[in-house]
Amino acid sequence: MASRGNRALIPEAREGLNIFKMEAAREVGVDLKPGYNGDLTSRENGSVGGQMVKKMVEAYEKGL
């Protein structure tokens, strides 16, 4: 299976995903900047991703 890379399944959703990522970063206290963030630690990046997943699961559970 070939890797998809970092492409959104729905390209029109990219801006919304970026806004969502920035909100999640603020909530966990990570200084995320638009563009390159290679200076962040794995822990910081993981906390942003974890917060995003947490919020998506909460939204899904509310919809049940």
Image (tube, rainbow, N blue to C red):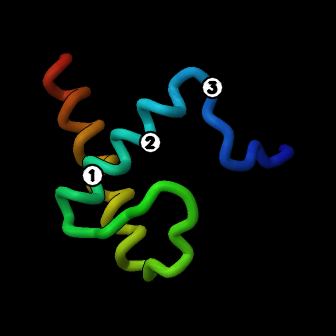
* Left or right position of 62 against 36: left
Looking at the image, do the residues carrying marks 2 and 3 touch, with CB atoms under 8 Å apart? no
Q: Residues within 10 Å of mark 2 (few under 14, many from 20)?
A: few
| Residue 37 horizontal/vertical position (percent) | 51, 69
Residue beneath label 3, please?
A: 11
Farthest-out residue, right: 2
Q: What element carries label 3?
A: helix
Residue 5, x across and y down, in percent: 73, 49
Q: Which residue is drawn at 20% across and 68% down?
A: 29
Between 4 and 61, the one lying in front of the other is 4
Q: Which residue is drawn at 33% across and 47% down?
A: 53
Q: Could you tell me which residue is drawn at 42 percent across and 61 percent down?
A: 33
Q: Quadrant of the rendered structure where residue 51 is?
A: bottom left
If you read the primary sequence from the N terminus, does the residue marked by circle 1 or circle 3 appear first?
3
Residue 24 numbered mark, or none: 1
Residues at marks 1 and 3, CA–CA distance in whole angstroms: 20 Å
Give amino acid for label 2. Answer: Asn
SS of the residue under disc 1: helix
Q: In this view, does 20 lie to the left or right of 18?
A: left
Mark 2: secondary structure: helix
How far from the left and from the top, in percent, is residue 1? Answer: 84, 44
* Mark drawn on residue 18: 2
User: Is label 1 in contact with label 3 (beta carbons under 8 Å)?
Assistant: no
